[in-house]
Amino acid sequence: MTHVTNTSLPTLRVRDAIYLLMLTLGVAANAIFQIDPDLGGYQDRWLTIDKIIHFAIAYAVVIAGRAAGVRQTIVLAGIMLAAVAFEYTQGFVAWRDIVAGFAGALLAAAWWLVPERRLKPR
């Protein structure tokens, strides 16, 4: 009887764990060191540079997760939880920031629907 070992599954799980660990460390760093505090006291608006930054960071983190081979469900769940947690660590929870982060994450995740052959230059 031959024994077949699947070596790709543990690697994928390790990548998932590392991705989630990095997100957790980013949120924890802001909670401890207040790298990006938000004290509130202003009217939160949609058309601000802050929303573009939240969108772009979530987009980039999802693309990085895909490039690292992290499973899509892990990437999306992780970034969405991190977006909410990060807002709470800032001191003022701006729901528009969370929505902007979700939008960036979902747009980046849409790239999973594009076949790899379309991503390669011709």
Image (cartoon, rainbow, N blue to C red):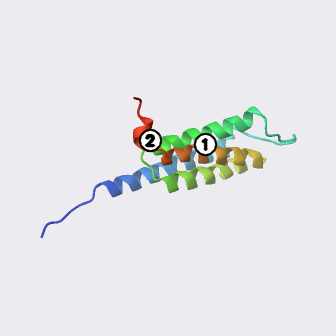
Query: Residue 8: percent from the left, percent from the top?
Result: 31, 54
Query: Residue 68: percent from the left, percent from the top?
Result: 43, 43
Residue under label 1? 58
Q: Quadrant of the N terminus?
A: bottom left
SS category of the residue bearing label 1: helix
> Residue 67, which numbered label?
2
Q: Amino acid at mark 1?
A: Ala
Neighbour tally class for label 2: few under 14, some 14-19, many 20 plus, Cα within 10 Å:
few
Do the residues under discs 2 and 1 have CB atoms within 8 angstroms?
no
Left or right: 109 in relation to 50: left
Asked which quadrant contains residue 50, the reply is top right
Outermost residue toward the left? 1
Can residue 35 be seen at all in this image of the molecule? Answer: no
Please state which of residues 19 and 24 is positioned toward the viewer in this rendering.
19
Query: Residue 41: percent from the left, percent from the top?
Result: 87, 42
Q: Amino acid at mark 2?
A: Ala
Against 106, residue 117 (above or below) is above
Please state which of residues 81 and 37 is positioned toward the viewer in this rendering.
81
